[in-house]
Image: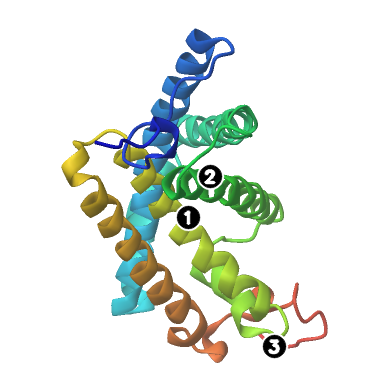
Amino acid sequence: MKTSHPMMDPRVSPPPHTKSPQASWELRLLHRTSAMLLAGFVLMHLGNHVAGLAGVGLHLEVMEALRTLYRQGFVEALLLASVLFQIGSGARLLWRGRGGRSGWVAWAQALSGAYLMFFMLVHVGAVLGARLQGVDTNVYFAAAGLHVAPWTLFFAPYYFLGVLSFWTHAGCGLYWNVPVGHRQAVLGGMLAVGVVMAAALVWWLAAGIPLEQIPVRYLTPFVPNVHGA
């Protein structure tokens, strides 16, 4: 019976790197550990936005409740450290895997990870910059750019791909760690969740929150001459 080469079989886990396998394994373990910590926050954050589909008021109530947890000083420091480590370790793993990546799952994991690095740099940087200026980074902060052309062309795919990349990257990570017979179902289910959630949240930010409901201070970075209360 003819068998495929392991490197060409997307059902098997990628082989260890020949260069410093112990160091590579340790880096992956640390990357995975910090990812699980960060994923806990991301799931709360996404759940908060999903609650917004039932109304902005509910979203803001849930947000204030969650902030009592994740806006504790030590929690914020831990989350920020996790973000920085994810970006640094992810970039290193992405570089180490160059030339040895095979199969669509491995590529989906790499590309979604690369986009998440970009998203975290932009999103966390924007949030920290706004907070230093005394701006409350609530849902209006997130939605403003989707209501001002041509910024919509950036923010719609930016948010959509951010949510989809999170579920894709997590799904690919699980793919290598579940029984072979369940891999396709697990990854397919997480991709489906990612697509549906990404589309719903972008719709909510762009159409579910009326422009007139967004305070002017959130719109001025995109339309400097806008006036209002």
Up/down of 124 relative to 15, above or below: below
Q: Estimate how packed mark 2 is, as few (under 14), some (14 to 19) or many (20 or more) residues with alpha carbons within 10 Å.
A: many
What distance separates the C-alpha of mark 2 from that of mark 1? 7 Å
Residue 224 falls in image quadrant: bottom right
Residue highlighted by disc 3: 228
Drawn side of residue 120 relative to residue 41, left or right = right
Up/down of 226 relative to 198, above or below: below
Looking at the picture, tell me which residue is in the foreground, 65 or 189: 189
Residue highlighted by disc 2: 113
Residue highlighted by disc 1: 165
Return the x and y of residue 185 as percentages of the image width and height: 21, 54
Which amino acid, by three-letter code, is at mark 1? Answer: Ser
Return the x and y of residue 3 as percentages of the image width and height: 31, 35
Q: Estimate how packed mark 3 is, as few (under 14), some (14 to 19) or many (20 or more) residues with alpha carbons within 10 Å.
A: few
Q: Are marks 2 and 1 in contact (CB under 8 Å)?
A: yes
Which amino acid, by three-letter code, is at mark 3? Answer: Gly
Q: Estimate how packed mark 1 is, as few (under 14), some (14 to 19) or many (20 or more) residues with alpha carbons within 10 Å.
A: many
